Amino acid sequence: MSSLSKLNLDGCRLGPDGGRALSEVVVAEKLPRLRRLDASKTQLRDEGVRALTESWMRRHPPPLHHLSLETSLLTGAATAPLLALVASKRMPSLETVALCGNAGIDERLYIDERSRRLLDAAFPDVF
């Protein structure tokens, strides 16, 4: 697994528990060449994203260039951990973060406009 550069989990229904499990595996120690992580449509929710970002703050994150969290049932609550990760400069190679499609069945499941603006300012390319 140390030579893996792309990990595509698109459509795997991991949920928040899966995000916590991923946080133990998706680290530089185990995946030192990982450049692209696609966790779209995984239902990670805010809790799963928080687990990933907290892990990457404690342990060396993989050298990701692209992180896709599209259609993962995220809200504006996912903004704070993502921004903290960017501010830490622990992932200097991260170029894109894909967040589109994070609209759920009710208003609470939208990434609000303020959160979008903050993420847009922090990441070179957020879509």
Image: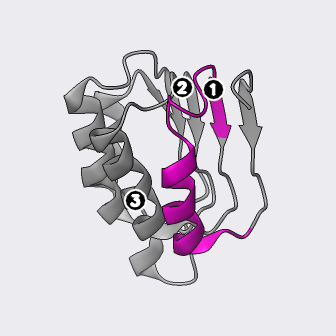
Whether residue 83 sits left or right of residue 25 in the image: it is left
Which quadrant would residue 77 be assigned to in this image?
bottom left
Secondary structure category for the residue under label 1 = loop
Camera-side residue of 122 and 47: 47
- Which of pointers 1 and 2 lies earlier in the amino acid sequence? 1
Whether residue 114 sits left or right of residue 50 in the image: it is left
Q: Which quarter of the rendered picture does the N terminus lie within?
A: top right
Residue 116 placement (x, y as % from top left): 36, 47
10 Å neighbourhood of mark 2: few (<14), some, or many (≥20)?
many
Secondary structure category for the residue under label 3 = helix
Which label belongs to residue 51? 3
Q: Dots 1 and 3: beta carbons under 8 Å?
A: no
Which label belongs to residue 34? 1
Mark closer to the observer (1, 2):
1
Which quadrant would residue 76 be assigned to in this image?
bottom left
Q: Is residue 20 magenta?
A: yes
The kind of residue tagged 3 is Ala
The kind of residue tagged 1 is Leu
The kind of residue tagged 2 is Leu
Evaluate whether residue 127 shows in this view: no
Please determine whether, in this image, residue 72 is positioned above or below residue 107.
above
Residue 44 placement (x, y as % from top left): 55, 65
Secondary structure category for the residue under label 2 = loop
Q: Dots 1 and 2: beta carbons under 8 Å?
A: yes
Camera-side residue of 82 and 3: 3
Please determine whether, in this image, residue 51 is positioned above or below residue 110.
above
Find the magenta span and give its range: 13-37
Which label belongs to residue 64? 2
